[in-house]
Amino acid sequence: MGRQPQPEIRRRLLDACTNYALEHGLPDRLEPLARATGTSTRMLIYHFGTRDALLRAVLGHARQRQLDTFGALLHARPDEPYTTTLHNAWTSMTGPDGQPFLRMFGQLRESSVQQLWPGFRRTATTDWLGPLADGLRSIGRHELATLVLAVIRGLLMDLDATADTTRTDQAFRHFLDTLDHRNGGEHASARRVCER
């Protein structure tokens, strides 16, 4: 009777593969992942079945990490205006902590990689609507979740295409000013102090 896959080993391998893919991108072959995990391609296949199954598991694991990290940043806090929360989340998403996720999930726009997760674009949109609506509810504007998400996604695409951090950061600050204006401007000065 053959050995049964061991969940704790699979989890360790998945963590190591995900760390590698976030740093270097999704590889075309299994060899870089085998080297990163200190095992063989045969053992990766043993635990995950196929190369595509492993890459799908890596994408899912990375996505869960992203949701856990940045979803928490979108939660309203009683001690700060929600526009400040959004500004801080944007800074983290586009900074060193967020860049690996943006690079990895940017690969899913390429046709060959997109086949690994065909419904990703829809999932990547709807995943963020709930946390944004909850946060915006704190300023009485939960209905703006789709608009806020569209602005964030559009500016992330702009940043990916141009690498112009200064311009996209400024555009997002201008957008947040419009949200402050809709709320009577009472939070704008507090957010500007936070940005200094």
Image: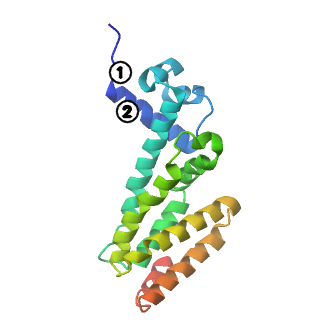
Look at the picture and state if 190 lies above or below 54: below
Q: Which residue is drawn at 60% across and 76% down?
A: 171
The amino acid on which the numbered mark 1 sits, given as a three-letter code, is Pro
Q: Mark 2 points at which residue?
A: 11
Q: Spot the residue most to the bottom.
A: 184
Measured as percent of width and height from the top left, residue 151 is found at 55, 71
Taking 13 as reference, is 121 left or right?
Answer: right
Q: Is residue 96 above or below residue 49?
A: below
Tell me the number on the disc at residue 112: none
Please provide percent x and percent y for residue 134. 34, 70
Which residue occupies 29% across, 76% down?
Answer: 78
Residue furthest to the right in view is 162
Residue that carries the numbered disc 1 in the rendered image: 5
Instruction: Count neighbours of disc 1 (C-alpha within 10 A) and say few if under 14, some if 14 to 19, many if 20 or more.
Output: few
Rate crowding at label 2 as few (under 14), some (14 to 19) or many (20 or more) other CA atoms within 10 Å. Answer: few
Which of disc 2 and disc 1 is earlier in sequence? 1
Q: Where is residue 76 in the image (x, y as percent from the top left)?
A: 34, 71
Can residue 146 be spotted in the picture? yes
Q: Which of 24 and 2 is in front in this view?
A: 2
Where does residue 139 sit, x and y in percent of width and height?
35, 81
Q: Which quarter of the rendered picture does the N terminus lie within? A: top left
Q: How many marks?
A: 2
